[in-house]
């Protein structure tokens, strides 16, 4: 097999970017070039990665919020966009009018939000320890409230399963059809605080990452043999003066076609992993700053990488130098995201 | 039988497990009788039992005179067994009863062979004794029941049950030998026994010791003197005693092992009185007595040593609290090293993630940390939204004032979308109490001006160096529509521009990259009609009061006060020379116009004052003020401090010429507050500058205030170098010591000079040095030499000390001096005046300020806490109470005089234990301070954050712009406005650290009301149970929740001085009543005094 060098030519920086740290970015699951970016500058940006001058990408619209936005996601179609942020609200954003409509309010900042296409509901997780389910089409959008034992740090959903990662390394699995009781209560396999959790597109399991350079892959099936398959590995470490400097793993994104996944860390590195073969496929060249968020587009052809300085790469203050805030689009070569055995 | 009522067995059934079985069985009727009251009324039953027991006891007293005293005992015991079916209990006292009864007749020949009496013994042996064989042995020795078959039967049965069957046989035989009665039954039992033995012969390994031990003559001789031991068991004498074993020839002295219990309190030689010949084992004693080695004897504690760990655990010192969030130069991180692996270091700051500090064991994700560092974490957005809603309902006054349509000139943004102009974001508009200085608020205001923001300011930074220079861009190109919408008075937007560029304030104005809606005035108006602007405009109007209307020439142009959409506290107030503003342009950062002007303005007051005076051409009074009776107000006690001035004529010192004070004004006396804001940052330099300027009398007239506005001192580096060198020397490092800096000031008295000795403390804002007042030093020397007399000396010294403290501020601020002078003036006749540090002189240069204050060498309360920690863990409660009273009294007095300290903490509170001869100091605590008690107390220092409430409107509230932590009051932490709360919390924090030896931590409890209601703050650490719980609870409740006590207070508003006083009086009463507890308060203070002085 040819050792293809994936040069930086496959990668470019979007000409538009937020003015403060990126909290999350996500490609649209519906159209290949729509990218949603939420930022600490209190805006959610909707970009088209391939429009504008030289097809270099341009901003379609932006949504002003009262406070920094912590997460965003697409709903059913590109016309439905949702955001959640520090101001305790869960909002529906209208890309046509730029309107921001509040769907509901938590009792603390809302850290994570995701859309479940099976139940067509918006799910939000907050530091108030509650998970809310919203039906955006209803006049009273809030449908379910479910308290968790700890502050919620990340949520992810696939099929009828909802994975909630919380403080104290707690992870709860819910069946969305029965929200009254967790389906499974788990403890993270990682020793440190869970940073993010992401469901596999095949609906069999999830990957979670911690602030201490590790990723765990686990499966939903509670059977013993299935649980025996779970594993964790180290990543996002750099040798510095004879010492391994261990960075947090901020973001995980599964390739929608191959089921491999990318991880973005505080070391400014994005790596591509084959979860089945337990192999690292690639490690891309270092970005200038902490990788805050990664996302594959719907067909897996593009990988968006959002970088911004901050706590994640060891900065003592919460300040994020504006020049570190960048959005990169990587064009994946044919078979670049393909796993070893595929 | 038939006429007896049937017994209800259901009742017994329910109590089965509580009924102790007895051999003879129980009467169901008696059981029912005793059990039914249990369910009915246990209390009544108990009292009935008590009465019955008392009856029996009475009967027992006279029993000795009866023919058959045993009968009474038997009835008593029977009753007890029946009444208390659950067996022995403390209530029933069956054990004691049996012991008493058996003991009573142990030597009574009448009952020696009475089967009833023997049964008591057997009952005792079977039910209570742990070694029934011992009881039987005792009985046989004392010849009890030896003629009764019952004895032998029971004993043999017992032995058989213990497996000692050969012995049982011996007992039967001895019974038969003794012709025990009834012999027939005994013979039958023996026969049965023999059958059992035959059926199951005993093995060879059965114990073979005698059933009834023979008396060992040697022991008997030892224990009972010379009395021959001839027990009643002579029948066994013939047998060889297997217990009698040959004694080892030599007993090796061995190490002391487990000591065998002996009655230590029996003095040697005090042998028991010779007993009757027949006995030998006179008394079996009670069960308790036989187990006495298991009970520890009670002894007086005096002289006892409680063994403890030999080494006292090292107590961690309580360090001066420093805000750790500011010190993260290098992110601390965890290093992990596993053998054989490369050591790992975690890049993320785990100390922050797993915070141990504030919420004990909480953990935070990076987003939470970032929100925290930006001050966005603890915001109650719900409340903010509600506040916003409230504003929506307010009329849009500022806009109604605009008469002409606003002209909008340019569009900056590439493609403004209408939708983006919408300002719906909740929380955007803060409540009117929002400070301008918090980051959130800063951002908020920033947003107001950048509302239709297309490109945020930072987005433009790259490669565009001109960006930061507003002047280049400001060429009429764009102006913020918000400014214009606020203008109101100006019909022509064009003119606005000239105004702005004219006085150059544009430098400090927002970067107006906000978008305008071309030609769409209505839209613009609509867009900006939001509550935010309403607030901004409101503020504007209020703030405009800053501008001195009496001196219009200063504030040019007059219309300007309506033009300042930014918070005037933030940029240079109108009185500032404009070049100052210019200087600041380079400081532009993300929010250039919002950058608080930290230091520059502090050096300005004098300059401003002078300029203002010249410009305003206010009548100058000349260097010497004329004092007459009506004119008191113009001096220290002048407006707004009439009340004080009137009761205290100005000190003569005031008349002394101040060489440094160039002019003195007599401006028209302005009544009322100087600052008209309702919400402001109390330490805002701009605001202070205005205060300095408007003070009547001016600061320059204060005694001890010397101002050199054009002179630079430049002494700071020299002093720093010196103290650094002395510090090195003290640390044992050799280095050349520069000459001690000598500070000389020109004053009215021919100058003063000070020699710097060493650094006392760094302080948050300014270093403090110990200096020698050379004037006093020389005078003392001269006095010693006899060159001057005492009177002359006093004239020279005028109350000054040889050692004084010098606070060097760089840049200078006269604020602390002002606060201290005011405090001393207003507290003139109050005892609390001793508790406020005295300010002697202030030398105010252009670049540095030297504040000379009283020096106390006993350290701070923090030092006391640490001394106590090192010695015994925490401070004694009485001492804490004494110091708390001092703290409360001082703060009461300050508050009553409208003064706020603003920065009360343990290290800002000096110990004031003045030396006092022992005979002049009463050991009993005197509430009124007599008997030397007023010489002991505390002294507040560091009034740098002080607030003089008389300068403000009564309803003023403050907002802090500094970073807050657990040591700041709840209002600050939650970004709510505050006034006197800051001091109450400070006092609470000090008391807490004294009581517990650690820093205060509070939790908020929300009341259960649907609206949330006011929060109630409590300590997280519980009080020790032996403390004066009620007192401390009340103290902390009042200090932590002052607002909730406002309604109960006499004043009805803050400060709640009367509530605090009540609390203090309660403590004083307690202290007065308990001051001699333990080693006594006076001794405690003496001890602390000695330790504190030694440490210095």
Image (cartoon, grey):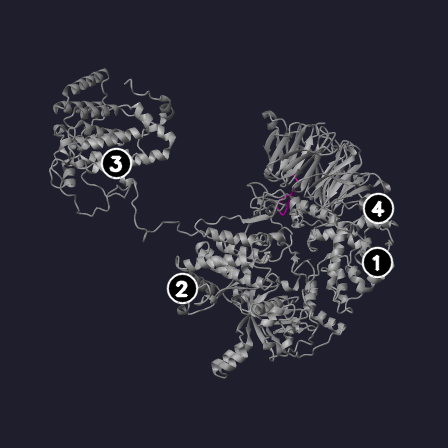
Please tell me which residue is depicted at 85% across the width and 46% down the height of the picture.
B415
| CA separation in Å, label 1 and label 2 | 75 Å
Image quarter (top left, top right, bottom left or bottom right) of the N terminus of chain B? top left
| CA separation in Å, label 1 and label 4 | 21 Å
Q: Determine contact: label 1, label 2, CB under 8 Å.
A: no
**What is the residue that sits farthest to the bottom in this orientation?**
B787
Viewer-nearest residue: B757 or B272 = B272
- The image's mark for residue B407 is none
Side of B865 where B552 appears, left or right: right
In the image, residue A170 lies at what x, y percent? 60, 36
- Identify the mark nearer the N-term, 3 or 4: 3
- The image's mark for residue B55 is 3
What's the chain of the residue with tag 3?
Answer: B
Dot 1 lies on which element? loop
| CA separation in Å, label 1 and label 3 | 110 Å
In front of the other: label 1 or label 3?
A: 3
Residue at mark 4? B416
- The image's mark for residue B923 is 2
- The image's mark for residue B474 is 1
Dot 4 lies on which element? loop
- Identify the mark nearer the N-term, 1 or 3: 3
| CA separation in Å, label 3 and label 4 | 105 Å
| CA separation in Å, label 3 and label 2 | 57 Å
**What is the residue that sits farthest to the front in this orientation?**
B3
- Residue A246 belongs to magenta span: yes
What's the chain of the residue with tag 4?
Answer: B
What's the chain of the residue with tag 1?
Answer: B
């Amino acid at each position: 097999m040819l050792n293809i060098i994936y040069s930086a030519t496959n990668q470019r920086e979007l000409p538009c970017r937020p003015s403060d740290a990126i909290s999350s970015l996500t490609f649209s699951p519906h159209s290949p070039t729509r990218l949603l970016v939420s930022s600490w500058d209190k805006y959610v940006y909707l970009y088209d990665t391939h429009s504008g001058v030289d097809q270099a990408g341009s901003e379609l619209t932006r949504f002003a919020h009262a406070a920094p936005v912590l997460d965003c996601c697409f709903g059913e179609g590109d016309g439905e966009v949702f955001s959640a942020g520090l101001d305790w609200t869960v909002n529906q954003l209208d890309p046509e009018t730029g309107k921001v409509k509040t769907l509901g309010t938590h009792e603390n900042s809302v850290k994570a939000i995701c859309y479940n296409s099976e139940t067509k509901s918006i799910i939000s997780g907050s530091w108030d320890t509650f998970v809310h389910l919203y039906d955006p089409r209803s006049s009273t959008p809030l449908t379910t409230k479910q308290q968790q034992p700890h502050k919620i740090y990340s949520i992810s959903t696939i099929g009828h399963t909802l994975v909630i990662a919380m403080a104290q390394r707690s992870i709860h699995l819910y069946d969305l059809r029965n929200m009254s009781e967790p389906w499974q209560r788990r403890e993270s396999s990682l020793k440190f605080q869970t940073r993010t959790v992401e469901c596999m597109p095949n609906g069999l399991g999830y990957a979670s990452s911690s602030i201490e350079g590790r990723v765990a892959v686990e499966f939903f099936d509670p059977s013993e043999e299935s649980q025996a398959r779970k594993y964790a590995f180290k990543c996002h470490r750099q040798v510095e003066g004879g010492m391994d400097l261990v960075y947090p793993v901020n973001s995980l994104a599964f390739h929608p076609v191959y089921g491999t996944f990318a991880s973005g860390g505080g070391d400014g590195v994005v790596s591509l992993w084959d979860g089945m073969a337990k192999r690292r496929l690639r490690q891309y060249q270092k970005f200038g700053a902490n990788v805050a968020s990664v996302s594959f587009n719907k067909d897996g052809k593009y990988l968006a990488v959002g970088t911004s300085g901050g706590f994640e790469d060891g900065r003592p203050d919460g300040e994020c130098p504006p020049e570190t805030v960048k959005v990169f689009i990587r064009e994946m070569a044919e078979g670049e995201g393909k796993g070893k055995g595929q | 039988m038939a006429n007896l009522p049937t017994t209800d067995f259901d009742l017994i059934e329910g109590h089965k497990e509580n009924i102790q079985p007895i051999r003879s069985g129980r009467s169901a009727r008696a059981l029912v009788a005793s059990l039914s009251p249990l369910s009915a009324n246990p209390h009544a039953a108990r009292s009935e039992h008590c009465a019955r027991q008392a009856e029996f006891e009475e009967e027992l007293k006279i029993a000795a005179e009866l023919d058959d005293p045993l009968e009474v005992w038997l009835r008593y015991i029977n009753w007890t067994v029946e009444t208390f079916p659950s067996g022995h209990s403390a209530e029933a006292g069956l054990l004691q009863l049996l012991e008493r009864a058996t003991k009573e007749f142990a030597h009574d020949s009448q009952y020696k062979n009475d089967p009833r009496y023997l049964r008591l013994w057997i009952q005792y042996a079977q039910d209570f004794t742990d070694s029934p064989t011992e009881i039987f042995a005792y009985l046989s020795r004392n010849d009890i029941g030896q003629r009764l078959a019952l004895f032998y039967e029971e004993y043999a049965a017992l032995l058989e049950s213990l497996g000692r069957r050969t012995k049982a046989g011996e007992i039967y035989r001895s019974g038969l030998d003794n012709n025990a009665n009834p012999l027939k039954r005994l013979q039958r039992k023996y026969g049965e026994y023999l059958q059992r033995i035959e059926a199951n012969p005993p093995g060879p390994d059965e114990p073979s010791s005698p059933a009834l031990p023979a008396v060992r003559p040697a022991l008997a001789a030892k224990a009972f003197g010379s009395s021959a031991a001839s027990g009643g068991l002579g029948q066994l004498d013939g047998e060889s005693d297997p217990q009698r074993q040959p004694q080892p020839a030599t007993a090796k002295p061995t190490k002391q092992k487990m000591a065998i219990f002996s009655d230590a309190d029996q003095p040697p030689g005090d042998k028991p009185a010779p007993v009757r010949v027949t006995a030998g084992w006179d008394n079996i004693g009670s069960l308790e007595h036989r187990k006495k080695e298991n009970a520890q004897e009670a002894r007086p504690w005096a002289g006892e040593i409680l063994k403890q760990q030999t080494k006292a655990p090292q107590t961690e010192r309580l360090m001066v609290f420093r805000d750790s969030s500011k010190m993260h130069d290098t992110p601390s991180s965890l290093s992990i090293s596993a053998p054989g692996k490369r050591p790992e270091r975690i890049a993320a700051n785990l100390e922050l993630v797993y915070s141990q500090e504030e919420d004990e064991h909480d953990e935070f994700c990076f987003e939470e940390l970032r929100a925290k560092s930006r001050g966005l974490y603890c915001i109650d957005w719900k409340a903010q939204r509600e506040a916003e809603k409230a504003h929506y309902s307010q009329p849009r006054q500022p806009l109604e004032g605009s008469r002409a349509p606003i002209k909008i000139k340019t569009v900056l943004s590439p493609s403004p979308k209408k939708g983006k102009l919408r300002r719906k974001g909740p929380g955007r508009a803060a409540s009117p109490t929002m400070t301008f200085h918090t980051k959130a608020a800063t951002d908020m205001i920033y947003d107001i001006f950048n509302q239709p923001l297309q490109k945020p300011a930072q987005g433009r930074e790259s490669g565009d160096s001109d960006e930061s220079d507003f002047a280049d861009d400001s060429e009429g190109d764009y102006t913020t529509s918000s400014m214009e919408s606020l203008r109101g008075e100006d019909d022509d937007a064009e003119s606005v521009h000239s105004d702005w560029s004219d006085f150059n304030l544009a430098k400090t104005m927002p970067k107006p990259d906000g978008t305008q809606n071309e030609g769409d005035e209505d839209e613009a108006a609509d867009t900006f009609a939001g509550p935010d602007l309403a607030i901004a405009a409101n503020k504007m109007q209020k703030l405009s009061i800053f501008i001195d209307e009496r001196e219009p020439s200063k504030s040019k142009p007059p219309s300007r006060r309506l033009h300042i959409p930014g918070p005037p506290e933030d940029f240079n107030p109108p009185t500032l020379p404009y070049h100052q503003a210019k200087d600041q342009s380079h400081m532009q950062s993300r929010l250039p116009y919002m950058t608080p002007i930290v230091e520059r303005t502090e050096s300005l007051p004098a300059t401003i004052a002078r300029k203002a005076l010249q410009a305003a051409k206010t009548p100058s009074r000349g260097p010497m003020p004329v004092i007459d009776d009506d004119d008191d107000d113009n001096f220290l006690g002048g407006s707004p401090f009439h009340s004080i001035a009137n009761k205290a004529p100005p000190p003569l010192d005031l008349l002394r010429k101040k060489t440094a004070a160039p002019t003195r004004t007599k401006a028209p006396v302005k009544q009322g507050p100087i600052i008209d804001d309702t919400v402001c940052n109390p330490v805002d330099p701009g605001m202070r500058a205005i205060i300095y300027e408007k003070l009547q009398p001016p600061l320059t007239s204060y005694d001890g205030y010397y101002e050199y506005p054009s002179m630079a001192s430049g002494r700071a580096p020299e002093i720093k170098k010196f103290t650094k060198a002395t510090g090195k020397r003290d640390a044992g490092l050799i280095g050349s010591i520069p000459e001690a800096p000598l500070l000389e000031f020109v004053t009215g008295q021919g100058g003063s000079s000070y020699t710097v000795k060493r650094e006392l403390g760094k302080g948050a804002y300014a270093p403090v040095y110990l200096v020698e007042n050379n004037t006093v030093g020389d005078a003392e020397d001269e006095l010693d030499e006899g060159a001057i007399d005492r009177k002359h000396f006093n004239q020279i010294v005028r109350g000054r000390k040889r050692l004084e403290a010098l606070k060097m501020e760089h840049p200078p601020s006269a604020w602390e001096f002002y606060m201290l002078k005011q405090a001393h003036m207003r507290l003139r006749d109050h005892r609390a005046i001793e508790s406020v540090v005295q300010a002697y002189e202030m030398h105010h240069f252009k670049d540095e300020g030297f504040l000379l204050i009283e020096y106390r060498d006993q350290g701070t309360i923090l030092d006391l806490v640490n001394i106590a920690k090192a010695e015994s863990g925490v401070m004694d409660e009485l001492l804490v109470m004494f110091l708390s009273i001092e703290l409360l009294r001082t703060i009461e007095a300050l508050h009553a005089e409208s003064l706020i300290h603003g920065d009360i903490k343990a290290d800002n509170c000096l110990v004031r234990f003045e030396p006092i001869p022992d005979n002049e100091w009463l050991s009993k605590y005197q509430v009124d301070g007599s008997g030397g008690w007023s010489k002991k107390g505390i002294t507040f220092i560091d009034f740098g954050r002080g607030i003089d409430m008389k300068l403000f409107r009564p309803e003023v509230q403050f907002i802090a712009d500094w970073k807050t932590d657990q040591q700041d009051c709840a209002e600050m932490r939650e970004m709510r406005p505050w006034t006197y709360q800051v001091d109450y919390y400070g006092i609470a924090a000090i008391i807490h650290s004294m009581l517990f030896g650690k820093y205060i931590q509070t939790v908020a409890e929300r009341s259960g009301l649907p609206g949330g209601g006011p929060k109630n703050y409590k300590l997280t650490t519980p009080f020790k149970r032996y403390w004066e719980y009620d007192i401390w609870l009340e103290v902390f409740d009042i200090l932590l929740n002052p607002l909730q006590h406002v309604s109960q207070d006499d004043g009805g508003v803050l400060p709640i001085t009367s509530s605090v006083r009540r609390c203090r009086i309660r403590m004083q009463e307690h202290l007065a009543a308990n001051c001699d507890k333990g080693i006594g308060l006076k001794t405690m203070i003496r001890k602390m005094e000695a330790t504190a002085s030694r440490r210095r």
